[in-house]
Amino acid sequence: MVILAADTSTPVNTVCLSRSGQILAETVVLSGRKHSERLLETVDWVLSEGGMGLGQVDTLAVSVGPGSFTGLRVGIATWKGLALAQGLPLAGVPTLDAMTGLGVFTEGVVCPLLDARMHEVFGAVYAYRGGIRTKLTPDRVCSIDDFLNDVPDTAVFLGDGATLYADAIRKRFPQAFFAPGHCAVPRASAVAWEAFQRLEEGASTDAAAVVPIYLRKSQPEEKKERAALS
């Protein structure tokens, strides 16, 4: 199964071409949220480096959040456009679920965290037992202190949210473990791997069902609501 995957949920623009979980080509570029300018040309480069055309892709996979409002809209809209134009199935992959694939975890609790701005993080808690992953909490957006209330002191933390709030985490949990730096940002290869496993289990590939996970309203929406109440 050849999968073309993308993650635009953060300032990192990442696209991957993989075959049955094996990476054929991948880009991971800190683009400053310029996804609309970079994404399609990155797709062309990845396909060229992978020695394939879009017609040889079996499935598309895209990160659906949580993450940047603009980034998610760009990534999902672009991948839906490719799915429609090429008649390809499209799998939506939650960003935090995919991030657990950035490391090799077999036992213990893992917490991927992304910077949600406004002094908050996007995060979720996962447990591994014998290499089997169980999601213990839903995706949420909250302060780091609130998030840590649901986390054991032996957890592994990863993501740019973990890097940003490392001092707060260490103050609360002196024994906390932080995954290496290459686990600090989402990667399209992790999205492709998560999609591959989900598809093996019969997950939906209906492009119409792929929608972003925002977790909170955008600032313009919040301003509009406040104006309506004033």
Image (cartoon, rainbow, N blue to C red):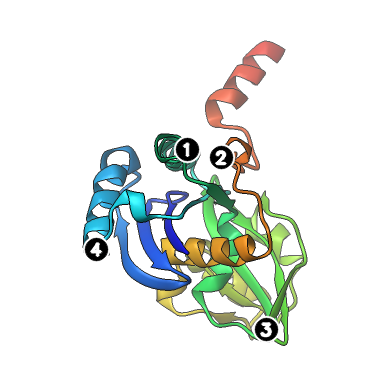
**Label 1, label 4: how far apart the Cα atoms are:** 23 Å
Residue 188, compared with residue 153, is above or below; it is: above
Q: Amino acid at mark 3?
A: Gly
Q: Secondary structure at mark 1?
A: helix
Q: Quadrant of residue 123?
A: bottom right
Q: CA distance from mark 2 to mark 4?
A: 26 Å
Please name the residue shown 44% across and 59% down the image: 3
| Residue on which disc 4 sits | 51
Residue 230 visible in the current orientation? no
Residue type highlighted by circle 1 = Lys
Residue assigned mark 1? 80
Mark 2 or mark 4, which has the lower sequence index?
4
- Residue underneath mark 3: 131
Q: Amino acid at mark 4?
A: Gly
Relative vertical location of residue 196 with respect to residue 108 in this rendering, above or below: above
Please state if 136 lies on the left or on the right of 59 as rendered.
Answer: right
Q: Which mark is residue 207?
A: 2
SS at mark 3 in the image: loop
